[in-house]
Amino acid sequence: MGDDSWLVVGLGNPGPGYAGNRHNVGQMVLAELARRMSASFTSHKANARVAEGRLAPGRPKLILAAPNTFMNVSGGPVANLLRFYSLEPSRLIVVHDELDLPFDTLRLKATGGHGGHNGLRDIIAATGSNDFVRVRVGIGRPPGRQDPADYVLRDFGSTERAVLPTLLADAADAVELVASAGLTAAQQKFHAPA
């Protein structure tokens, strides 16, 4: 695989019953990137759906991947895809939901722990590395005493859905900028106060 390729994994749960859940925001961002590339997802032997393409001529190649597994066991498909495409974890971008960020907020980081996110925990365990970029999409904390596990498995509310297309577009822009200009450039743009 060329030096300009990136594996972009959107975390979520498989099946239409989970498609609108807050936990699936990573896969929603993948759908936006695939739309921009006019690429379609196909089944891959690594137990994932994959779409490949470039956003423009001369831009880095993006390999978009949605594991067919549940979020908490995403590591196997991610490790298999890295091997299949001969990519190091440093060429991996994981897009995921983040309870500890307010809704409609993005944060990007490289390396670090899993922060309690079971999808990240499994990827770190399966790849043996925490040296990958994370695009953290804020979904906010549950209201009142609602269990966080229930909250992430619920669809976005109507107020959130009105803003969601902009959030997904911003997250897709962040992935593009990481791949084309590097993490620091993307952080400078997306971490700046509005």
Image: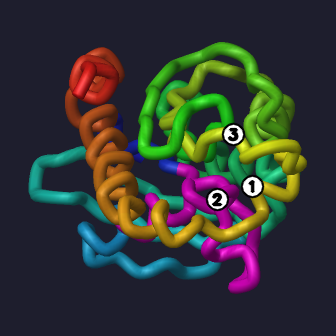
Residue 168 is covered by the magenta coloring: no
Image mark for residue 152 = 1
Q: CA distance from mark 1 to mark 3?
A: 9 Å
Q: Is residue 77 above or below residue 121?
A: below
For badge 1, the amino acid type reads Val
Q: CA distance from mark 2 to mark 3?
A: 11 Å
The kind of secondary structure element at disc 2 is helix
Judge left or right: residue 39 versus residue 135.
left
Residue stretch rendered in magenta on the structure: 9-32
The kind of secondary structure element at disc 3 is loop
Between residues 185 and 107, which one lies in front from this camera angle?
107
Residue at numbered disc 3 = 141
Nearest to N terminus: mark 1 or mark 3: 3
For badge 3, the amino acid type reads Arg
Q: How is the image coloured?
A: rainbow
At horizontal 43% and vertical 35% (from top left) the residue drawn is: 106
Between residues 141 and 120, which one lies in front from this camera angle?
141
What number of labels is visible?
A: 3
The answer to whether marks 2 and 1 mark residues whose Cβ atoms lie closer than 8 Å is yes
Judge left or right: residue 180 versus residue 10.
left
The kind of secondary structure element at disc 1 is helix
The answer to whether marks 1 and 3 mark residues whose Cβ atoms lie closer than 8 Å is no
Nearest to N terminus: mark 2 or mark 3: 2
Judge left or right: residue 5 versus residue 60.
right
The answer to whether marks 2 and 3 mark residues whose Cβ atoms lie closer than 8 Å is no
At horizontal 38% and vertical 68% (from top left) the residue drawn is: 162
